[in-house]
Image (cartoon, rainbow, N blue to C red):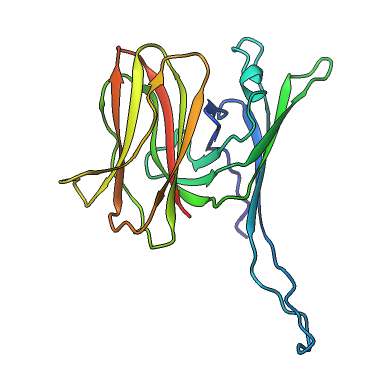
Amino acid sequence: MADKRIHKKNLTVVLGGLDLTPYANRVEVDPTLQTPDSTTLDDEAHQFEAGLLDWKYSADGFFEAATADPHSFLRTLTAAPLIIADGRPAAPGALALVIDATKSKFGQVIKLGDLWGFKVEGMAKRRSGWGNLIDRNAALNASGQSSEIVLPAIAEGEELLLVQAVHGGTAGTLDVVVQSDEAGFPSPIARATFAQVAAAAAPTFEIQRVPGPITDTRWRNDYTVTGGGDWGLTLAAAIV
């Protein structure tokens, strides 16, 4: 009989602007749909309605003593978005879970003679969900565009949730514009312009929401690198 167990090892995990992929060894997501009781005196059995969808996440791992101290960054997080993408390295178009958190908390796990661990938890009550990576690059050092990816058309009442995580830059500045168009990008339209990021040691992130309807199904990152720096970036999108 074939072994149907799945051993998942290759994931990309980004919290806020910090790339946790080299450090996390467990990540858990719990989407919970509320079901308010709508039973009336006229009903013969309990009736329930679809309510709000809550997203909760947690991640554990450890940092090597020789690395810079990411704990100081994690301690500042109060509402850090989470990106979990399939593959390592994850490529543009990879399946990704994108969670826009409304609150986060961080704890350290320290035991004598053991690794210096961490635990982060968060919750999202705004709309979040499954989508795709638009871009993932550890060494952006010149201006250009990412490969185009395909997303479904965005209907009226839906919106595109965009999360940009900049893991760091060695020099200069980085500007990111998310564009949409038809195949080949003959007439690209700028859908979201992120704030310029200057080279700094601390990772950073930004969240934008683009309302529908949008009929374009091709998307890409149009980025501008100035000052000759090397940049690490993860950019994810989900229709919610």
Q: Residue at point 32% right, 56% down?
A: 214
Pinpoint residue 54: horizontal percent, then vertical percent.
65, 53
Q: Quadrant of residue 177?
A: top left
Q: Tell me: 57 left or right of 187.
A: right
Q: How many marks?
A: 0
Measured along the vertical axis of the image, is residue 109 above or below residue 134?
above
Image position, residue 207 (x, y; %): 47, 38
The residue depicted at 53 percent of the width and 39 percent of the height is: 83
Q: Nearer the viewer, residue 178 or 62?
A: 178
Outermost residue toward the left in this view: 186
Q: Residue 166 location in percent, x, y?
A: 45, 26
Question: Who is closer to the viewer here, 77 or 142?
Answer: 77
Q: At 42% from the left edge and 23% from the top edge, which residue is drawn?
A: 232
Q: Residue at x 47, y 33 (%)?
A: 206
> Where on the picture, by quarter, is residue 237?
top left
Above or below, 205 relative to 147: above
Q: Where's residue 29, x and y in %?
A: 64, 47
In the image, residue 203 above or below residue 93: above
The residue closer to the viewer here, 230 or 179, is 179
Rendered-image quadrant of the N terminus: bottom right
